[in-house]
């Protein structure tokens, strides 16, 4: 569906992209994860045809972006980082305006606008001016604007910045519905939990380069740090070391009053370990889960935190 | 307190736009007005007033007077027929014609009232005032001398009828040398009893030039302010991110610019029509005297001004820049273009500069319609100039828009 080959882009002396290669299949939910200034928005701007790369090729649905940019535009819907709406128009008027730019018939467009307002949970506020909306509601309309022409590919540039939890959930639900219906979604963010929740595949970008690529599980495997479950107790573990090693298969380390179990699958191992410890009369006072996540992977790969 | 003052002073100095607005703009305007009004101050440095003269008497005496007038530094005389002179005044090319009717010489010789008349353009009253000064102090002096001299000679001849012509001629010569020698250059004018008939050339229609100046001058200047603000919405779109979203859509980027131009043009046109309808209702401005010409001129004015608004937005980087730059450019353009002071008050070099302003062509077009009552073709000519200005600055705006506003980083 989308092929990005050896993409380079510089702004003066600053090299924003240094040879990006990404392949995104039809219907995939693809995450571009990286800190601010990594080059995510530059990729989105190039895909949206408003920015020309210095070098490299992009193909959308087989069409070369350089040659058939108009055709490519019809396949894609873009959710920009900014809330690009007219504050003094209502939600309905905004959506109708943006839809008309795609030459959709008014009658069809009106139906589509109502569908999208329903999808975003804002049908009751459709005639309210955008300036009366909360940040999260504006974000939802911002996303709806990109869906008016039913694009096959949805490019989303940090669409949840400054969004309240309720709106965030609406957005996630809406995106999952779209994903289910076969829309290809490219999602940039620096929130790793969003990527983990939504994306099938991701590319981790730093300083204009892809430093890791693949599914969440593929990337987790790259990590040398395994996941762990730390159990605290008011009794000592040392004298029950043998019983524990006989009943629980996971490797572990014992400290004074806590024990650390290493796990490849924390979700299934957790309940088993708790049950076993209960049977050998260990009074659990606290449980800590040390998961391998993209944050820790990013730290491991770059030596920096994602939000630095 | 001192710290706060120093902090504000530091911030002020670092804000180049604020400094420009505070110091440069008043300096520019003071300079323009000083130069402008200097042109009518009557000072020695001002250029001579161009005066048309129609000599219907065509005698040695009238020609002698005309030559003497032409030799004055305040006047630049051009002899022309009365019909052509009136036409030139009506077209706004000249401001007045001094007419010597048949019998002027006889009247001078007989000491009667001299049949002469000054036809003038009422809209140029300030210049006419200066012209009157120059004429009264010179022309009347010349004619007055001639009349007094003739009366004295007549009296001498009557009282000394028994003397031979040779003796009488000698007496005339001595009287002329002793009493009129110094005055022959017009340095000691004798004006008592002399009246120059002054006639407004547009007296039949009695148009109110001050009303035309006020409506035309203010409407164009205010329109420029409005379109500058409307043009700035282009930068607002960029700052708010909606321009980016427009660029995502399948429309041609230039459609965005032309869409803004059309929006600005429509509002500008409505603003002009509202103002002129108001001037008609409130001040009896005769907007129906040549409605087609007025419509053509207003359309051309609205287009030129809208293009100016878009051009302004295209050369600025932010709305704030538009605000400060537009104030400077519009005030300067209005000063030189005739919105703040009538065109005829300006010195020649400012009149040349005025040609580059939208205000000038539009205001003069309105004078042509409401004051000079010129045919539509004259208004079409000025409208074409306005359209040309609009096209040129639109093209520059397109170029700037492509290179700067569409630049995404």
Image: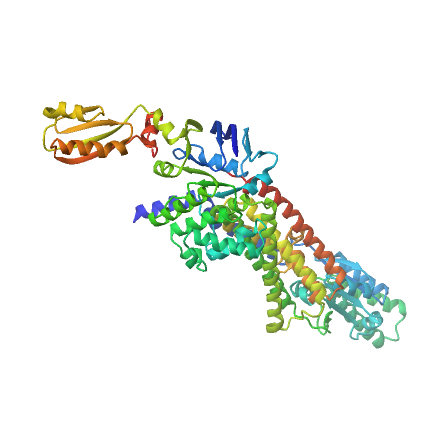
Q: Which quadrant would residue A214 be assigned to in this image? A: top left
Decide if residue B209 is on the left or right side of residue B13.
right
Q: Position of residue B127 (x, y in %)?
A: 67, 62
Decide if residue A227 is on the left or right side of residue B224.
left
Question: Residue at left 35%, top 24%?
Answer: A222
Quadrant housing the C terminus of chain A:
top left
Question: Residue at left 90%, top 70%?
Answer: B164
Q: Which of A190 and A183 is in front in this view?
A: A183
Report how many numbered discs are placed on residues in the image: 0
Decide if residue A39 is on the left or right side of residue B116.
left
Q: Can residue B24 be seen in this view?
A: no
Q: Where is residue B398 in the image (x, y as percent from the top left)?
A: 61, 44
Q: Which of B341 and B39 is in front in this view?
A: B341
Q: Is residue B315 visible?
A: yes
Q: Which quadrant would residue A268 be assigned to in this image? A: top left
Q: Which of B124 and A122 is in front in this view?
A: A122
Q: Which scheme is used to colour this image of the protein?
A: rainbow
Q: Where is residue A185 in the image (x, y as percent from the top left)?
A: 46, 39
Q: Where is residue A256 in the image (x, y as percent from the top left)?
A: 12, 27
Q: Relative to B386, say whether A265 is above or below.
A: above
Q: Which of B199 and B367 is in front in this view?
A: B367
Q: Which quadrant would residue B131 be assigned to in this image? A: bottom right
Q: Relative to B28, say whether B220 is above or below.
A: below
**Looking at the image, which residue sits at the far bottom?**
B159
Decide if residue A178 is on the left or right side of residue B68.
left
Question: Residue at left 81%, top 71%?
Answer: B108
């Amino acid at each position: 569906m989308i092929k990005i080959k050896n993409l380079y882009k510089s702004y003066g002396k600053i090299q924003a992209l240094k040879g990006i290669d990404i392949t995104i299949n039809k219907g995939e939910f693809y995450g571009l994860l990286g800190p601010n200034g990594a080059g995510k928005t530059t990729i989105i701007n190039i895909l949206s045809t408003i920015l020309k790369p210095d070098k490299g090729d992009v193909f959308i649905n087989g069409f070369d972006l350089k040659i058939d940019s108009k055709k490519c535009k019809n396949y894609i819907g873009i959710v920009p980082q900014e809330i690009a709406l007219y504050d003094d128009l209502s939600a309905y008027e905004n959506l109708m305006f943006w839809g008309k730019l795609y030459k959709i018939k008014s009658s069809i467009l009106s139906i589509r606008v109502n569908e999208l307002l329903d999808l975003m949970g804002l049908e009751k506020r459709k005639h309210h001016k955008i300036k009366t909306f909360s940040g999260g509601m504006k974000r939802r309309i911002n996303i709806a604007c990109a869906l008016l022409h039913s694009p096959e590919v949805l490019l989303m540039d940090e669409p949840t910045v400054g969004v309240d939890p309720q709106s965030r959930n609406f957005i996630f639900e809406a995106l999952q519905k779209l994903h289910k219906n076969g829309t290809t979604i490219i999602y940039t963010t620096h929130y790793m939990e969003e990527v983990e929740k939504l994306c099938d595949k991701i590319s981790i970008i730093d300083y204009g380069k892809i430093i890791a690529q693949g599914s969440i599980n593929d990337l987790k495997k790259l990590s040398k740090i395994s996941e762990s479950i730390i159990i605290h107790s008011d009794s000592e573990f040392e004298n029950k070391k043998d019983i524990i090693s006989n009943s629980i298969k996971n490797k572990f380390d014992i400290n004074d009053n806590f024990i650390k179990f290493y796990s490849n699958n924390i979700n299934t191992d957790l309940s088993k370990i708790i049950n076993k410890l209960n049977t050998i009369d260990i009074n659990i006072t606290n449980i800590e889960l040390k998961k391998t996540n993209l944050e820790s992977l990013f730290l491991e790969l770059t030596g920096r935190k994602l939000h630095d | 307190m001192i710290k706060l003052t120093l902090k504000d002073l530091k911030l002020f100095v670092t804000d180049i736009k604020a400094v420009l607005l505070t110091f440069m703009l008043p300096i520019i305007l003071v300079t323009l007005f000083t130069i402008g009004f200097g042109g009518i101050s009557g000072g020695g440095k001002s250029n001579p007033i161009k005066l048309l003269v129609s000599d219907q008497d065509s005698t040695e005496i009238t020609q002698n007077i005309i030559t003497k007038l032409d030799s004055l530094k305040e006047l630049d005389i051009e002899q022309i027929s009365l019909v052509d002179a009136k036409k030139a005044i009506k077209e706004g090319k000249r401001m007045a014609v001094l007419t010597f009717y048949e019998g002027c010489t006889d009247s001078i010789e007989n000491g009667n009232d001299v049949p002469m008349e000054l036809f003038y353009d009422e809209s140029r009253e300030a210049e006419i005032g200066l012209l009157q000064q120059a004429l009264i102090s010179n022309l009347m002096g010349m004619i007055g001398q001639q009349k007094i001299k003739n009366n004295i000679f007549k009296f001498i001849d009557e009282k000394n009828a028994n003397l031979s012509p040779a003796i009488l001629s000698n007496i005339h010569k001595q009287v002329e040398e002793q009493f009129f020698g110094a005055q022959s250059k017009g340095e000691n004018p004798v004006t008592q009893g002399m009246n120059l008939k002054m006639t407004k050339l547009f007296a039949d229609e009695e148009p109110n030039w001050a009303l035309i100046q006020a409506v035309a001058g203010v409407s164009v200047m205010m329109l420029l302010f409005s379109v500058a603000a409307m043009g700035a919405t282009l930068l607002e779109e960029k700052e708010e991110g909606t321009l980016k979203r427009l660029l995502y859509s399948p429309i041609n980027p230039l459609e965005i610019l032309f869409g803004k131009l059309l929006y600005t043009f429509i509002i500008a046109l409505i603003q002009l029509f509202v103002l002129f309808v108001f001037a008609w209702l409130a001040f009896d401005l005769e907007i129906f005297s040549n409605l087609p010409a007025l419509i053509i001129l207003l359309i051309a004015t609205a287009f030129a001004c809208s293009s100016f608004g878009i051009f302004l937005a295209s050369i600025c980087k932010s709305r704030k820049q538009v605000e400060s730059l537009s104030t400077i450019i519009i005030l300067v353009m209005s000063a030189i273009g005739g919105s703040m002071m009538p065109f005829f008050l300006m010195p020649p070099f400012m009149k040349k500069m005025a040609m580059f302003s939208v205000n000038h062509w539009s205001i003069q077009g309105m004078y042509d319609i409401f004051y000079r009552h010129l045919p539509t073709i004259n208004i079409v000519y000025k409208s074409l100039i306005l359209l040309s200005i609009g096209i040129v600055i639109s093209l520059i705006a397109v170029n700037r828009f492509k290179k700067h506003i569409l630049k995404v980083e």
